[in-house]
Image (cartoon, grey):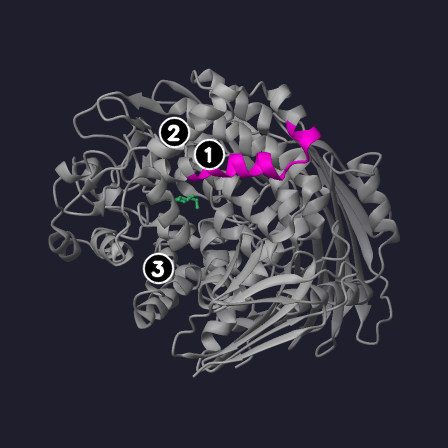
Amino acid sequence: MNEFLWSYSGFVAEHEGQREALCTLGNGYVATRGALAEAEADDRHYPGTYLAGVFNRITTNVEGREVTNESLVNAPNWLPLRFRALGGSWFSAEADTVESHDLELDLRRAVLTRKSRLRDSDGRTLSITERRFVSLSDPHLLAIESTFVPLDFSGPVQIESALDGTVQNTGVARYNDLGTDHLEHVQSHALDDDSMLLEVRTNDSGVAIAEGARTRVFDSRGERLPATATCEATERHVRMLMEIEAGEGREMIVEKVVSIYCSRDQGIYSPAVAATHAISVAEGFEELLQRHVRSWSNVWDRSRITLKGDVGHTARVLNLHIFHLLATVSKNTTEIDAGVPARGLHGEAYRGHIFWDELFIFPFLTLRVPELTRALLRYRARRLGRAREAAAAEGHEGAMFPWQSGSDGSEETQELHLNPKSGHWIPDASRLQRHINAAVVLNVWRYWQSTTDLEFMRFWGARMVLEIARFWASLATYNHALDRYEIKGVMGPDEFHEGYPDRDEPGLDNNAYTNVMAVWCLCRAFDVLEILPSTRRAELIETLGISDDELDRWGDISRKMRLCFHDDGILSQFEGYADLKELDWDSYRSRYDSIARLDRILEAEGDTPNAYKLAKQADTVMLFYVLSTDELGEIWERLGYELEPDALARNINYYEERTSHGSTLSMMVHAWLHSRLDREKSWSLFRSALESDINDVQGGTTREGIHMGAMAGTVDLIQRCYGGIETRRDVLYINPRLPEELHELAFGINYRRQNIRLEFSHDHILVRLSDDTGHEVPVAIDVLGEFVVLEPGDTFEMRLD
Ligand code: BGC
């Protein structure tokens, strides 16, 4: 099995959407779904091209309420390229008889190849071999090359190559009542006899997007063939029609090279001028391809994870996950202001918004190319002002980052959502997930632990941590009777619980995950103040107006936060959880094919998940995922509670029975937790988590975009959980826990500017520091309790009995 090939054989119209998402090509600046070049958007096909960070807002009236939604914009489709015998119909997999159809995504080279043999209604047969890529080395260039052979006819063939700006955002059916048209026409015309230009603008945010396309025809020896070309330009659309004499069995190659720019780009005069220039100087397909492949090869050198054992399928899926992560975030992302959308740049679910999912996505990046995480953290830092405004608007101090973030850091969570099961529009309280702020601190802190990047901390990191600490302190209220602090009116990660069944206002009190993470954030705020050089510390304390009294209060809260328990030691998901009803799981399982989305089922039945002990995803047990046992133990002690040695086992067993795994993030977290209890179970949950997108386990949602958190999270599970890596207190802890099936595991990380090679098997551990970074400093390592300081070039080995 080739672990770097992802392929599909045969044309299955119903699977097109999912294949398109999984065959998306991207370079961190732009991504394009793997739609057929001849396809237009309909209920099966969805050509989508997304520029990282390009959003637009539309306001619609829903049930008498004006609702505004901000979406990542579907940019003009650059793919259209199709053929027909003059007078015949366009060859298309959908309309014609498909004699054969194969799709192959080469993960190593990031090239998508399609081979089809199509027969039109008049009985003509054409073979098409198409290759396409979205250049990693030249982020504004994309290319498609189609080699066609008329198998049983000769005569004039027409080739259509187009740039289509009439596209809308219709990739998610349940959003379609909320406005879908984001673009307006600017210009469309020919540039010369083989090139054309299309420029559109987003109709509210005013971002200009220009695409240039150059289409040329060659024979099999690479000689350019003369083709009569006409250009037809209309509003938001331009196409080049070419006519060429084709001969039976004779191969012709059509090459379409496309440039794409937008007005958010730096270093350009205007998108149209940049796109025109780029297309005029672009090399041919082959030259561009070689550079692109070289860049991917470098990227894979840093990112590759090698698995040995009977794990071929696992390795291939992990490579697919790494591939999509790298297609969404790359060096090109560091040049722009963008976050990582929860569904990648692969579709329109969640409208391209950025969530706490960063928490699952960053660790792989931080331990490979920390500059990427730095750039993504700066996306947050630029929006600190908005976060402060949001806190103030709710009567709080400090900074409150939004649950869903888009262009400017305003809260983008929808106000109403549609339950497709009942057809009802329902108020959406998920913005109350204030724990997103803990995720921001966690991401800053992990980045710091891995890099000790003081410049980042001084300029951006410390401020975010301190402002968020201040927010938590202001959100916490003191309960005199209990002598404890409480956080009320929030939601935890479990989105099924939005409030109490008998309370009108949404929100829950004392969510365990939120309260503990608030304490953890306050502790990190003190650490950050220690880290800063004294002058910067004094500056920040003065600028932010942090008084000694305030610091005392932070300390007090961090020692007296309230946690609720029930059933003799189970950490209650929130206060009052114990009073909720048990759900009759067996009855629901027998009545529904899938009960993952119990929220929709219960609402459609006129009931509410708020009334039951159930969860969409890991909530309380997220604590054991995010924090190590040592860290949790310290917090418990600080709070005056006792963390029983079997706390993990008891809590996971309790909550697992009550979790429907209605989020792809859930299974992966549970797999992680079981690695400490039951490796066999962990491995089986991990294998299920791997299926999220390739088998579309959340009922048809992959076509709307990949689940980036689950993809990155499964990769991280291999490196940090089974590899047992932890970066804490200036030490790189290594404590591998390989499942039986995994005989060997090897990968490289970048830690504190050192490249470190790690190799694990069931009886051996190897840690090797390279000496090629130019920043050679020793690294403190703890391997299974043995503390060593390794110098650059050193190798440490340990035999395991
Ligand atoms: C999950 C959230 C997640 C979001 C985006 C939801 O289904 O409940 O935890 O952040 O998807 O991936």
Residue at image mark 3: 673
Disc 3 is placed on an element classified as helix
Residue at image mark 1: 522
Rendered position, 558 above or below 247: above
The reply to whether callout 2 and callout 3 are in contact (CB within 8 Å) is: no
Magenta segment: 520-537
Residue 457: x percent and y percent?
64, 39
Disc 2 is placed on an element classified as helix
The reply to whether callout 1 and callout 2 are in contact (CB within 8 Å) is: yes
Mark 1 CB within 8 Å of ligand 1: no
Mark 2 crowdedness (10 Å alpha carbons): few <14, some 14-19, many ≥20 = many
- Residue 314 inside the magenta-drawn segment: no
Instruction: Work out whether mark 2 precedes mark 3 in sequence or the reverse, and give the earlier one.
Output: 2
- Residue 528 inside the magenta-drawn segment: yes
Is residue 322 found left or right of 245 in the rendered image? left
- Of the residues shown, which amino acid type is indicated by label 2? Ile
Is residue 631 found left or right of 377 in the rendered image? left
Measure the C-alpha gap from mark 1 to mark 3: 25 Å
The answer to whether residue 506 shows anywhere in this view is yes
Residue 557's disc is 2
Residue 369: x percent and y percent?
66, 56
Tell me what residue is drawn at x 37 percent, y 43 percent: 635
Measure the C-alpha gap from mark 2 to mark 3: 28 Å
Residue 541, image quadrant: top right
Disc 1 is placed on an element classified as helix
Residue 789, image quadrant: bottom right
